[in-house]
Image (cartoon, rainbow, N blue to C red):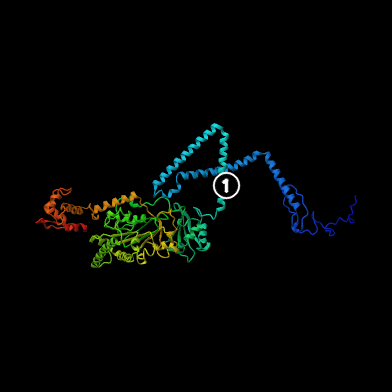
Amino acid sequence: MTAEPNFSNDPDHNPPGQDRTDAEIVPFPKTRDQDPADEPDATPPIEGRIVKTFPALPGGAVSGAQMLADWRASAQQLTDRVGELAKRPDLVINAILKHELYYGALGTGRGIRAAWSWATAAELNAQLGSNPKMVLELRKSRQRMGGAALGLSVLATFMVWAAFGPFLFTLAALLGLGAAGAAERKLRSAGKADDGRGALGTHPGSKAVRGALANAKLGKLDQIRVIGAVTRDGDAWIATVELPPGIPYSAAAKKRPEIASAIGVDEVQVAIDPVKGHNGRIKLWVADEDPMQGDRVENPLVSQAAGTSFWTDKVFAGRDARGRAVAFSLVERSYLIGGEPGGGKSVASNNILCFAALDPYIDLYLGDGKYGFDQMLFEPLAKGVIGDRQGHDPVMEMLETVREEMNRRYKLLRKLGTPKITREIAAKYGINPILLHLDEIQTWSASGDTKADKAFVLSVADIVGRGRAAAIVTGAVTQRPAAEVVPTRLRDILSIRWALRCTTPDASDTILGSGRASQGFSAAKFNADQRGAGYLLSEGALPIQTRSAFLNESELSGLASRAYDLRKAAGTLPATAERPGVKLLMAVLDAMGGHPKGAHTAEILDALTKMDGYDGWEAGKLAAALKPLGVFPRQVEIDGRNRNGYRREDVTQALDRA
C-alpha cells in the first residue's frame, strides 16, 4: 500500500476547508496603487494596428511623439483600406451605382412631376374659375414648348446613338442620373434641416386631437374628451370634442388660430361649430387643403328657371369652409359690404342684385360712386339710377324720392293700425319692396364737403332706420371701411355685415363690429389668392367664414336678360322708351312737330297713323290711351284756330312723370 503524501511542510498547500491568508492574488498587469476604475475593460478588442505607446506626461497631456505615432497609424490604416478596395474595383462601382441609381431615380421622378406641373400651369388652378381663358391659353403655350423640347431631345439622342454608339449615350444617362441624384440629396438634406413639428395628418386619432387642443391651452390632456370616433367628412376630418368643465364654445372659437397651429394647418382650414344643447362641446372640422381656393362657387340662380321672391327666398351668398350653403333673407334687413380693392365686393354685390332683379316686384334704386360699369346691366331694370351724374345732388334727389315713398307707406301703416308692411299688405295695396343699393358710399359720405357729407349720411341713416318696417332694404358698399366713411350712427343699424379681404384687423372690425378680430374673426388674414373669401355676419351670433359665389360676365348678362323678361311679363319694367305708354307719349310729341303750344287732334292723328303701331287710330282711342297717363284733350289755339287738341306742356310733364 502506498503511503499518502505529507504536505504539512509545503508552504503552498493548505488543508481542505481552510483558506490561506499569507499570500495576495493580484491581476496582471498591475501597477502599484492602481485605481479600481482603471481595471481592464472586458470589451473585445477592435482589430487595428498596434500603436507604440510613450510614457504619459503629468496632468494627462499627450506628447508630440505620441501624436505623431497616432497619425502615422491612422494614415497606414487608410492606405491599407484603399489598397484593399483597389484590388476589388467592382465593389466600389457597384456601391456607387446603387447609390446614384436610387437617388437619381428619385430625382428624375421629382423632375418629371415638376415639368408636368409647369406644363399644366398647376400654379394657376385657383384662377381657373375666374379667368379660364388665360389659364387654358398658358397651358397650350407651355405644352407646345414642352413638346418641342421633348422632340428635340429624342432626335438628339438618336443622332448621338447613331454617331457614337451606346457608350456615349450610356455615359450621358449616368451623368444625368448623377446630377438628378445630387439635386435630390440636396433637397432631402435641406428638408431634414427645415423639418419641424409634423401635422396631425388626414386621419388623426383621438389622442392626437386631444393633444392638439391641450397644446392650444384649452385645458389639460386628461380633461379633454373626444366623443365618438374621428371620422372623414369629404376632403376633411371631423371630431366632436368635449372641453374641460367651465370652458365654453366661445373660448374655443377665440382659440382658432392656436388650434390650427397645434394641428399643423392654416387657420382657414379649421372650422369650429357649436354642438346644439351642450355649450361645452364643439365640432372640430379640419380640411385637407385650403377651402378658400380651388374651383369657384357657383350661384344656383344660374340654373334656376323661376324667379325669386323677396318674402320667402334667401340670397345665396356662397359656401362656408365646410362647403355648406350660406344664405340670408332681406326682409326687414339692411347690409354693409366692405373690403380692400380687389377683395371681391362687386362679386358679393352681384349675388344680391341678381336676387333682387329676379323678383319682378322689387323696385331697384341704384347708385355707383365710381360712376362706372358695375351696375349697367341692372340699370334698365331700376326705377331710380344715378348713372354718370356726379356730385351730391343726383344721389340726394334719389334718396329724397325713396324717403317720400317711405313716408307715404308710414301713413298707410298708421291708417291700417299695423307696425310694418307684410306680404299680405303689400299684395293688397300694390306696394313693392324697395332695394336701395349704394356702391362706393365714400364718394358721398367722405368727399370732403362736410355739410353735404353729413346731409347724405343723415338721409341714408333715416332710410335704414325707418325703412325696415316699410319694406325698404338699404345696402352700402365701400372699399374704405373706416369710421369716417361709415360713421357709427349708420354702421350700427346696418344689420348684415359682409367683410371681404381687408388690409388691417381694424378695417375688418369696422365692418363686422368692434372686437371681432380679437375673437378670431378678422378678414385681414385672407390672402390675395383666396378670392371671394371673407366673413359674413347675417343670421347668427357669430360671423361665418364664407367664400362668395362668383358670377361671370355671361352668367350676369343671362340673369339680367331673364330678369328683364320677368318684369316685362309682370308689367313692372321702369318707364323706358320700350314701354307702350312712354312710346305713345314720345310718338305724340313727334306728331306735334315743332309748334311750342302743341297740336290739334286731327293733325296729331294724321301724323300718328303713319307710324308703326298706330294704324287706324281715331280720336276716341287716342284719348282713352292718354287718359291713364294724365293727358287730356283740351282747346288749343294754333295760328288763330282754336280747336280740340293736346298741349305740348301736358305731354312733356306726363313723360317726366313716367
Quadrant of the rendered image containing residue 581? bottom left
Quadrant of the rendered image containing residue 441? bottom left
Residue at screen point 52% across, 33% down = 159
Q: How crowded is mark 1: few (under 14 residues within 10 Å), some or many (20 or more)?
A: some
Residue 259, image x, y percentages:
49, 59
Q: Can residue 542 be seen from the camera position used here?
A: yes
- The vertical placement of 220 against 307, above or below, is below
Closer to the camera in the image, 348 or 237: 348
Locate the C terminus by quadrant.
bottom left
- Secondary structure at badge 1 equals helix
Q: In this view, does 143 lie to the left or right of 12?
A: left
Q: In this view, does 44 lie to the left or right of 353?
A: right
The residue wearing badge 1 is: 185
Residue at screen point 15% across, 48% down = 610
Residue 540, image x, y percentages:
38, 62
Residue 627, image x, y percentages:
16, 57
Residue at screen point 14% across, 49% down = 609
Residue 229, image x, y percentages:
48, 56
- The vertical placement of 71 against 254, above or below, is above
Residue at screen point 43% across, 48% down = 125
Amino acid type at image mark 1: Arg
- The vertical placement of 118 against 401, above or below, is above
